[in-house]
Amino acid sequence: MCSAGRKPHLLEAADYNHLRLMLAPVLSGRHRPHALLSLSNMATSSILFAFNDMGLNEANRLPVIGFDDFDFAPLMNPSLTVVRQPVKLMVRYAVDLLFRKIEVLANRPVAAEPTYENQAITLAGELVCRRSCGCD
């Protein structure tokens, strides 16, 4: 975004209903965003509800990309562009980490404090382009 001369703006809300209510003034304000990136299915739902609350038709809606794919994303109007996460691989890594921690706890001396190494795991998502991002 920065290389394109755009400045990202993060909206944080206490819950998804609050996010839905926060969006109306942002979407109708003078500094209306050029597009929205939602970080969860529930946040995406809040964005779509806000569009409906404001009576925005497809032509007046901002481009949207959701994070996480779901069964009805292609059926939305317009169909929802998403970043699909590798859920099966995420689960496999999480279970593996859990079992390693259990093994550490089971094999440590009783008086010893357990030690864990922080580990960053990066998994590639898949961009699934549909109409909501402005592409056809």
Image (cartoon, helix red, strand yellow):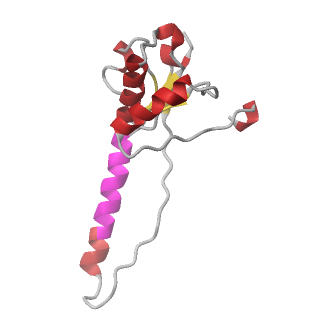
Foreground residue among 60 and 30: 30
- Which secondary structure dominates the residues rendered in magenta? helix
Q: Check residue 134 for magenta coloring.
A: no
Q: Position of residue 10 (x, y in %)?
A: 55, 41
Residue at the spot 54% in from the left edge and 23% down from the top edge: 28
Where is residue 29, by image quadrant?
Answer: top right
Left or right, 37 with respect to 55, comes to: right
Q: Is residue 110 above or below residue 89?
A: below
Residue at the spot 32% in from the left edge and 88% down from the top edge: 112
Left or right, 45 with respect to 102, comes to: right
Foreground residue among 133 and 59: 59
User: Which stretch did the figure color magenta?
Assistant: 87-101
Q: Position of residue 121 (x, y in %)?
A: 48, 53
- Please count the marks in the image: 0
Q: Position of residue 91 (x, y in %)?
A: 32, 47
Quadrant where the image shows the N terminus: top right
Q: Position of residue 116 (x, y in %)?
A: 40, 73
